[in-house]
Amino acid sequence: MDDISELKGEKICREILERGLELKGIDEIEVFFQSNKTNEIKIEQNDIGVPKTNYYRGVGIRVFQNGGQGFSSTNVMGEEEIEKALKNAASIAKKSPADPDNKLPEPGKIAGVEDIYDETIEDIKLENLIENASDFKNEFLMDSRGIIDSASFKSSRSVRAIANSRGISAEEKSTHFQSSAIGFAREDDDISSFDIETQAACQYKDFKPVVSAENLREKVISSLGARKIEGFTGKILLAPEAAAKLIVNPIISAINAKNVADGLSPWKNKLNEKVTSEKITLSDRSSLPGGVGSKSFDREGVPPVDMEIIENGVLKNLLHNSYSASYFDTKSNGHARGGAQSTPGVGTTNVLLRKGDLPVSEICRSIKKGLLVNRYSGSADHLSGSFSGAVKGGYLISSGDKKPVREAMISGNIYELLNKVEAVSRDTSQVGSFRLPYLLFKNVDITG
């Protein structure tokens, strides 16, 4: 047999698969391979740190025996370690209770996704990230009142591969360029709230640290002079960053079919029923060219289905992996998520919330009294919908005029809020693998 440590992705999976099938009593087996090389440099308190490189290479092995599932993983790719992982997974499967929904998927047609791998990655060195960090720092500090609390700049090259005993065999490589920065401003004794700016791209040419620096600088400088406000019940305008945490993440939890099956979703038995305002249309697009969440197959080797999740307020689809699909007597729509260190979960690829017709500036002018929420920091119960937390980077809006505020809080219920949408902006921003507009809600409790 070939030396596994010398093989690449898909061949490693096939080799381990063949060895596993030689073990007695195994009904089915899946091998998932993952490798990552990540370069990173950080800025702390305006100082650029020492760059570093991290490597990961490992496999996760799932074994099924008489309806029981066993899993084991290893990041040591030697012969003995692989053999040990195989036997561990088989032993766990033998001792696990039978579950009729423990199944592997059948092969499907896998089509590649454009622009998720940058061929120039081999030419991008740590020196390039140092230059990115330096450009970011220089741009941000164009205003001396700005302070970079921390910032990180990363480039990564990833390979995923899978093979299972039902005939699935696939491999895909991707690249990602990411930055995340937290900053604030100080003018004499006046200190602004902290704010954050993130960026992610699959192509290096689309990675724009200077633009991020400009955006962050503008946020923190404009929040100087913040004042307390009296509490009131009124409108809030959620910026994309706040909408991701307070609105989209709870929705993703609610449409996770495994959560629905386990009674952990408020939208159980709600398919094809109205669950939000008709102004909400949310989709998942795995085939989006250059999308940071794009992929041609999921954690189980199933091609993801591009679909509407919520269409004009009506719940149209749930997210399934093979287990939840079997439970609901349907087919997986390719939304198994995870890596080589865990069994498959359920998740999204690229989430798009349909934009509206009005620019955010016009929406602001329509608000007689309300609050712009750039970031939200607090609790949000995905099952009950209850939320309560602090507004970060907030602005009191009066007919388009904006004044920074501090120590404001908002509270309410997420799922009630989703039926109080007054407007959706034409402007959108990328937040991780989400593309989101601004969302205007009415009748929200605001505490000063």
Image (cartoon, rainbow, N blue to C red):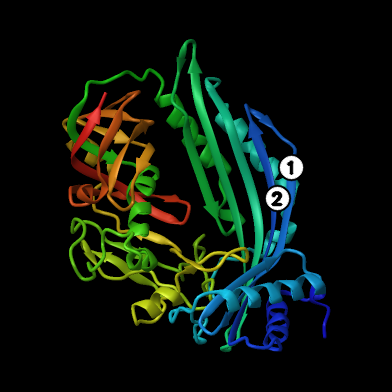
Query: Image quadrant for the N terminus?
Result: bottom right
Relative image position of residue 368 (x, y in whole percent): 16, 31
User: Could you tell me if the residues under marks 2 and 1 are in contact, i.e. CB atoms within 8 Å?
Assistant: yes
Quadrant hosting residue 21 = bottom right
Position in image of residue 384 (x %, y %) = 27, 50
Q: Which mark is residue 51?
A: 1
Q: Which mark, by number, is residue 39?
A: 2
Measuring from the top left, give residue 54's x and y in whole percent: 72, 52
Image point (36%, 20%), residue name = 226
Q: Quick one: SS at disc 2?
A: strand
Residue placed furthest toward the top: 188
Q: Report the front residue among 144 and 16.
A: 16
Indicate the amino acid at tag 1.
Pro
Number of dots carrying numbers: 2
Corner quadrant of residue 4: bottom right
Q: Nearer the viewer, residue 302 or 140?
A: 302
Identity, as a three-letter code, of the amino acid under mark 2: Asn
Q: Which mark is residue 27?
A: none
**What residue lies at 82% left-to-right and 82% top-to-bottom?**
2
